[in-house]
Image (cartoon, grey):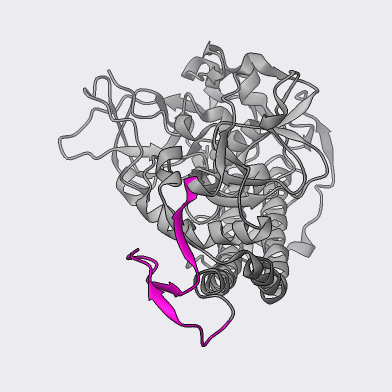
Amino acid sequence: MIDGLRPYPEMKPSGLPWLGEVPAHWDVLRAKRLLKATEIPVRPDDEIVTCFRDGQVTLRKNRRSNGFMIALLEQGYQGVRTGQLVVHSMDAFAGAIGISDSDGKCTPEYIVCESRVDDAVLGYYSWVLRQAARTGYILASCPAVRERAPRLRYPDLGELRVPVPSSDEQRLIVRFLDWHGAQTAKMIRAKKRIVALLNEEKQAIIHRAVTRGLDPNVKLKPSGIPWLGDVPEGWEVTKLKHLTRFQNGLAFKPSDWSSSGTPIIRIQNLNGSDDFNFTIKSDLPDLLLIKKGDLMFAWSGNRGTSFGSFIWDRDFNGYLNQHIFKLTDYKVHGKYFYYLLQAVTKHVEDESHGIIGLVHITKPELGSVSVPVAPPDEQNAIATWIDGQTSALAAIIQRTTREIALIQEFRTRLIADVVTGKLDVRVLANALPEITDDRPVEEAGGDEDLDEQDATDAENEEVAA
């Protein structure tokens, strides 16, 4: 059905670089003409509503219950009601804008809006403002209270110029995007389930090989480690700190960054992202560089994805940031060691701590983890066997993950084209069936994929008074 979308027949300049041309019958007005801030009193039973970067606005307990900055005194809190537009004043530039699905209360750092005119559809303007955030328009309009901390107040929001279709057209756009979002979410969930199952199978192969070896008839002995169980008789059990040195990356400050230079390698880059927005010009020690083939361990990241061992597969060098250890001087076969670390990641995750849905482990904690170690003459054979057994699975995982990214990219582009008037959805939206699955789509990876450098700032909504 998407193939049936066509451009509007007549366009005109909007006068805004981020918006470009709009349909000839649309207006472009300041947001204060359409939206007004509310000051609803808090009721005794109101629970906290949170505005997330993926556009979901819901009771905090509906998303997660830990990892928030908790206010000691809820001074200045305001009421929020289902259907209102909520803008996170300190995170609007990153897309924390949406329609509340719940009644509750929120910090004064939120802008809670309702329609100033009868025919303004708040759902449409939440899409428009999120698109404005993606283009950098909101960031450019925000005064900053400190470095990398822009804050959008209602007067700033009110001055933003936004496209204004008719109210009927606004409703049709929202209907189309909600329907497409539900279909996209269903597709992404199915593909993520495939990736999860393939990863489980891959991890089972790795775990069996590095804890039992390749001989199914080998004699076993107790390892003395509850999570590990028995290991082959000829194997050693030792702590990771006796097998390698963990070299810390650096906590780079914004003042260290430059427009060109050596890339700063972040956890998202270990997962394959080509986003190297941060570079540094510095004569740092070579020990802090990683090059192709180097082994690393991300010690703070998302459970099951951004946490664990990685081999750098790029052809250029980069400096590690503070959330990654470089493993040096290890005393075992490199690829075998990589698989050994993968096998113990689940145990390390279970023993770790963290905030905002992340896992975190210190160097002493990681170094104290006991692992089984095969004799030197078996290590290469185990690594080679695992390579052969998991290569096909890895290829399918990589392909499916790329498909998910492409679906998300298409969704993001479609939203931009629809809310800014580049594609006409009116006829199609009128013919759409009712939406039966209202779970939100992770448009750009969602909150779970926040970059680790921004993770501690991801939820500023609970500001201590």
Residue furthest to the front in view is 234
Asked whether 300 falls inside the magenta stretch, the response is no
Q: Seen in the image, is 302 located left or right of residue 77? A: right
Asked whether 230 falls inside the magenta stretch, the response is yes
Residue drawn 41% across the image and 58% down it? 347
With respect to residue 190, does 342 lie above or below?
above
With respect to residue 299, does 395 lie above or below?
below
Quadrant including the C terminus: top left
With respect to residue 456, does 304 lie above or below?
below
Q: Seen in the image, is 50 located left or right of residue 273? A: left
Q: Position of residue 419 (x, y in %)?
A: 67, 43
Q: Position of residue 458 (x, y in %)?
A: 47, 34
The part of the chain drawn in magenta is 215-241
Q: Quadrant of residue 316?
A: top right
Q: Position of residue 89 (x, y in %)?
A: 47, 24
Q: Seen in the image, is 223 located left or right of residue 140? A: left
Q: Nearer the viewer, residue 432 or 270?
A: 270
Q: Quadrant of residue 267?
A: top right
Q: Quadrant of residue 249?
A: top right
Q: Position of residue 112 (x, y in %)?
A: 40, 30
